[in-house]
Image (cartoon, rainbow, N blue to C red):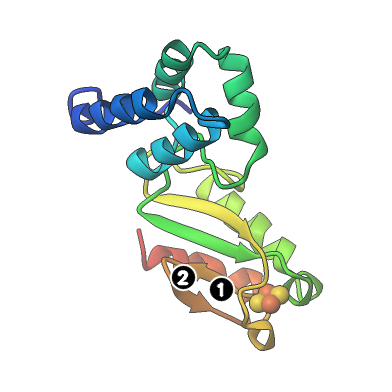
Amino acid sequence: MEFKFNWEGNKDRIDKLTRFMEANKEKKGVLMLVLQEAQELFGYLPKEILELISTNLKIPLSEIYGVATFYSQFSLVPKGEYVIGVCLGTACYVKGGQQILNKLEDILGITVGQTTPDEKFSIDGTRCLGACGLAPVMMINGETYGRLNVDSIEEIINKYR
Ligand code: FES
């Protein structure tokens, strides 16, 4: 799924990133700094911005993708309006967290790490959310849902549609 990048609407952010690259290009580890700044500015790393970074810093695009995909702090797709974090910690796993995740993927037609084409939902797999007593647990934009079972998922998602 390709997300269309809005150059005009992002003009100020692009200017800011360009200035940031200019100011930091002599620094060691500049790529990491620039990717962090870009993720912060755009909320994810659009491929158009990775190309811009590649040209500006004279670093091959393949190397930039290597770094961007290695670190989980970076995302190559925009996050949805609702970010669903499914706990994959041990307690949740034991109580069926994986089945909850599978069901969500079925309902939304995306896999973990992806965003629906209408940019409404994203699914993330997360570490322990600190609510093991309620396992299996998921969180939607900071709201916790516990003691989940596969049959309850659709109803919860429908509240956000
Ligand atoms: S393991 Fe899921 S909340 Fe702790």
Q: What element carries label 1?
A: helix
What's the residue at 51%, 70% (across, down)? Answer: 139
What's the residue at 79%, 72% (across, down)? Answer: 90
Pinpoint residue 19: horizontal percent, then vertical percent.
29, 27
Query: The residue under label 1 is which amino acid type?
Result: Ser
* Residue for badge 2: 156
Do tag 1 and tag 2 residues touch (Cβ < 8 Å)? yes
Q: Residues within 10 Å of mark 1 (few under 14, many from 20)?
A: few
Query: Does residue 28 appear left or right of residue 47 in this picture?
Result: right
- Residue 42 lies in quadrant: top left
Query: The residue under label 2 is which amino acid type?
Result: Ile
What's the residue at 48%, 23% (across, down)? Answer: 26
Above or below, 133 relative to 9: below
Which disc, if any, is residue 152? Answer: 1
Pinpoint residue 32: horizontal percent, then vertical percent.
54, 35
In the image, ligand 1 is in what quadrant?
bottom right
Quadrant housing the C terminus: bottom left
- Residue 9 lies in quadrant: top left
What's the residue at 61%, 44% (across, down)? Answer: 111
Q: Is mark 2 on a helix, strand or loop?
A: helix
Query: Does residue 2 appear left or right of residue 110 in this picture?
Result: left
